[in-house]
Image: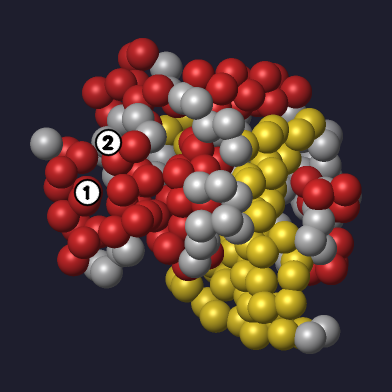
């Protein structure tokens, strides 16, 4: 019932049918612990491991919609987490590819297992500092950063194709604004999609860890 209510809400908000279809094809309960199954379709973030979380469904839908992913696209995701967002993207890119990076080894292991179990063969999870992008796999049609960043990292801008789109929550450690950036020559055309709160991006172009 809760899933149906979410879908109805997104339809009213103009979320594209292919984005909703991808959501329906990936079971959110698969990515959380058994005691949280009953909350899998509540419109809230849920904890995973290492102090990380899986974003609330509406946030996932809004980011995916804004990214404007097309069949065959080559997509970079910075911050695999447990692999939920990458799995949804996999259903939209089709014969394209989702390259997902994660800096925490424990999350890399879980994400790889999850995408493999769900048959998302067009997703690869890389244990690396995603704030630097992933040059061997560049350039990218689309980039989604799923952690709060002080600004969009320069290497990621450089690794994005002309006309490509980057979605990122940009701000401080407490609140960010979701930014949709379209690469036009050497500049970014920016659209601001509202306030959000994400866990901080780690790595060279993220936030320094507190001691």
92 relative to 31, above or below: below
> 119 left or right of 145?
left
**Which residue corresponds to the image point at 51% horizontal and 62% vertical from the top-left?**
70
Disc 2 to disc 1: CB gap under 8 Å? yes
Task: Specify the quadrant that holds the C terminus.
Answer: top right
Identify residue for label 1.
6
Q: Position of residue 92 (x, y in %)?
A: 46, 51
Residue 190 in picture, x, y percent from top left: 61, 81
Total marks placed: 2
Whole-percent x, y for residue 120 in the image: 53, 32
Crowding near the residue tagged with mark 1, few <14, some 14–19, many ≥20 C-alpha atoms within 10 Å: some
**Residue 99 or 199: which is nearer the viewer?**
99
What residue sits 35% from the left and 25% below the top?
Answer: 29
Distance (Cα) linking label 2 and label 1:
8 Å
Residue drawn at x 15%, y 47% as measured from the top left: 5
Q: Secondary structure at mark 2?
A: loop
Q: Position of residue 149 (x, y in %)?
A: 70, 58
- Visible in this render: residue 159? yes
- Residue visible at 82% across and 37% down? 128
- The residue sitting at the top extreme is 34
Between 113 and 173, the one lying in front of the other is: 113
**Which residue is denoted by mark 2 in the rendering?**
41
Whether residue 49 appears in this view of the structure is no
């Amino acid at each position: 019932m809760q899933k149906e209510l979410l879908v109805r809400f997104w339809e009213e908000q103009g979320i594209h049918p292919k984005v909703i279809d991808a959501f329906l094809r990936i079971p959110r309960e698969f990515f959380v612990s058994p005691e949280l199954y009953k909350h899998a379709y509540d419109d809230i973030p849920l904890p995973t491991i290492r102090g990380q979380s899986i974003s609330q469904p509406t946030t996932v839908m809004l980011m995916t919609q804004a990214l404007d992913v097309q069949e065959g696209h080559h997509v970079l995701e910075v911050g695999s987490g447990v692999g939920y967002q990458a799995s949804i993207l996999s259903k939209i890119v089709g014969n394209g590819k989702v390259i997902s990076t994660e800096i925490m080894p424990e999350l890399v292991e879980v994400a790889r297992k999850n995408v493999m179990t769900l048959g998302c063969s067009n997703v690869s999870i890389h244990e690396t500092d995603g704030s630097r992008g992933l040059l061997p796999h560049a350039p990218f049609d689309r980039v989604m950063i799923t952690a709060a960043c002080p600004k969009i990292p320069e290497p990621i801008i450089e690794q994005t194709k002309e006309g490509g789109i980057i979605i990122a929550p940009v701000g401080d450690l407490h609140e960010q604004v979701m930014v949709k950036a379209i690469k036009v020559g050497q500049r970014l055309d920016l659209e601001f999609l509202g306030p959000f709160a994400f866990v901080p991006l780690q790595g060279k172009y993220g936030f320094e860890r507190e001691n």
